[in-house]
């Protein structure tokens, strides 16, 4: 299973990615985790990424592409993967398409987690408090939501046009949302 999980910041992509990837026995590949690990380790890429993350902006495509494409070439992705946080722009969609073609592969499904407005802001403020994340202030959250609407939300239409998009309501407990994802995936093809 080769899948992509998309949705606005705070939709629960990271939490759901781990659960779904584990159930399917595939690696969850999160750009956010890759970036945060580089920030924690103080790598040059991490320092560059932190500047963008702290402002609520997307890390530029060239930095993101290099990390993700390298990760997709690792052996553990041969039987599938779950991408969380990539692609985020139309340009990255086409970069991913090229990468997958070179591996004689394509995405099986794109799961869109749907959640709106103030619920997202409240979730991210709670997460910032719980996890001490410097990139989750209210101003930065609102900026990230605006950037998402402008740059990432259009990806849903691209994947819908390709016939691989399923939308899942992301409001509810972690377990309820996970079950909704599994139900949507089961409706497409049995696990």
Image (cartoon, grey):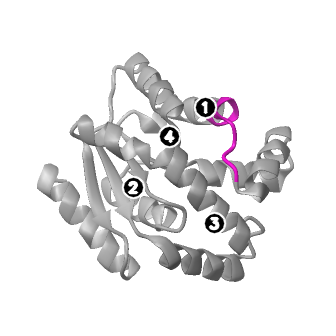
Left or right, 134 with respect to 59, comes to right
Identify which residue, 31 or 156, lies in the foreground: 156
Q: Which residue is mark 1?
A: 65
Q: Residues within 10 Å of mark 3 (few under 14, many from 20)?
A: some
Q: Residues within 10 Å of mark 4 (few under 14, many from 20)?
A: many
Residue depicted at x 64% and y 33%:
61
Of badges 1 and 2, nearer the viewer stands: 1
Precedes in sequence: disc 4 or disc 2: 2
- Residue 1 lies, with reference to residue 136, above or below; the image says above
Identify which residue, 8 or 71, lies in the foreground: 8
Of badges 3 and 1, nearer the viewer stands: 3
Identify which residue, 109 or 157, lies in the foreground: 157
CA distance separating discs 4 and 1:
9 Å
Precedes in sequence: disc 4 or disc 3: 4
* Residue 140 coordinates in the image, percent (x, y): 71, 64
Of badges 4 and 2, nearer the viewer stands: 4
**Does residue 136 appear anywhere in the picture?**
no
Tell me if residue 5 is in the magenta stretch.
no
The outermost residue toward the top is: 102
CA distance separating discs 4 and 3:
20 Å
Label 4 residue SS: loop
CA distance separating discs 2 and 3:
29 Å
Residue depicted at x 85% and y 46%:
47
Q: Which residues are magenta?
A: 57-65
Of badges 4 and 3, nearer the viewer stands: 3
Q: Which mark is residue 87?
A: 4
Label 3 residue SS: helix
Q: Which residue is mark 3?
A: 142
Residue depicted at x 39% and y 59%:
22
Label 1 residue SS: helix
């Amino acid at each position: 299973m080769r899948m992509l999980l998309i949705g606005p910041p705070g939709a629960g992509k990271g939490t759901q990615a781990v659960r779904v990837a584990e159930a399917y026995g595939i690696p969850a590949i999160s750009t956010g985790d890759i970036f945060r690990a580089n920030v924690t380790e103080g790598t040059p890429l991490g320092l560059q990424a932190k500047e963008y993350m702290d402002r609520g902006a997307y890390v530029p495509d060239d930095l993101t592409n290099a990390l993700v494409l390298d990760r997709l070439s690792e052996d553990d992705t041969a039987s599938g993967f779950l991408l969380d946080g990539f692609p985020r722009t139309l340009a990255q969609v086409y970069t991913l398409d090229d990468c997958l073609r070179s591996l004689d592969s394509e995405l099986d499904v794109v799961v869109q987690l749907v959640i709106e407005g103030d619920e997202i802001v409240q979730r991210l403020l709670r997460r910032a408090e719980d996890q001490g994340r410097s990139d989750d202030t209210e101003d930065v959250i609102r900026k990230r939501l605006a950037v998402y609407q402008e740059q990432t939300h259009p990806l849903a239409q691209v994947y819908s046009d390709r016939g691989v998009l399923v939308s899942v309501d992301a409001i509810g407990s972690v377990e309820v949302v996970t079950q909704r994802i599994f139900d949507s995936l089961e409706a497409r093809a049995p696990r």
